[in-house]
Image (cartoon, rainbow, N blue to C red):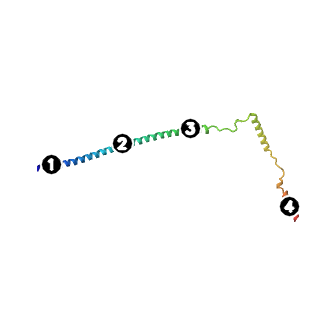
Amino acid sequence: MTVTFALAWLIAGLVVGIVATRLYCLRQFNQSKLQVELNETKQQLQQYRSDVTEHVETTHQLMSQLHENYEKIARHMAQTKMQLIERPTFDNRSELNYFSADTTAQIRQSIHKLDERRKVKDEPSYQPLDYSNTASGLMKNKTEQNSSDN
């Protein structure tokens, strides 16, 4: 019986050992699986950080370029303002002529003559006939017929 008990204890020990080894292996497998997932997650986090860093750097560069372009536009507008707006205005009376000197002199003389003609106005000393007190034209005939009918 001692041999039977020993064999029973041996078989029971083997079963317990196999179960314990199996559980230990599963736990190790799960740990290695978790370790792989942890490494993948760390790698994804690192990639995300590098993407964010790259995005921030690109945005910073673009904003710097935008600021420089804005300054260039502001300088250009200031220079254009100096050239276009703050220049002395063109004087219409300047001696810039499209005609020869003789033609210009003749035009000026004729302008003065026209001004003199316009100044002298002939005012009539009598009132126009359209406003006379007596009947004239068609109205004259109607008034004569009315007076003869009466």
The type of residue carrying mark 4 is Thr
Check disc 1: other Cα within 10 Å, few if <14, some if 14-19, many if 20+.
few
141 left or right of 81 in image: right
Q: Nearer the viewer, mark 3 or mark 2?
A: 2
**Of marks 1 and 3, which one's residue comes earlier in the chain?**
1
Q: Count neighbours of disc 3 (C-alpha within 10 A) and say few if under 14, some if 14 to 19, many if 20 or more.
A: few
The residue carrying mark 1 is 7
Q: Nearer the viewer, mark 1 or mark 4?
A: 1
Foreground residue, 47 or 6? 6
Q: Are marks 1 and 4 in contact (CB under 8 Å)?
A: no
Q: CA distance from mark 2 to mark 1?
A: 53 Å
In the rendered view, does 2 fall on the left or right side of 20?
left
Q: How crowded is the residue under tag 2: few (<14 C-alpha within 10 Å), some, or many (20+)?
A: few
Q: Residue 150: which quarter of the image?
A: bottom right
Q: Earlier in the sequence, mark 4 or mark 3?
A: 3
Q: Which residue is mark 2?
A: 43
Residue assigned mark 4: 143
Give the amino acid at mark 3. Answer: His
What residue would you read off at disc 3? 76
Callout 4: SS: helix
CA distance separating discs 1 and 4:
164 Å
Indicate the position of residue 137 as horizontal and vertical percent values: 85, 56
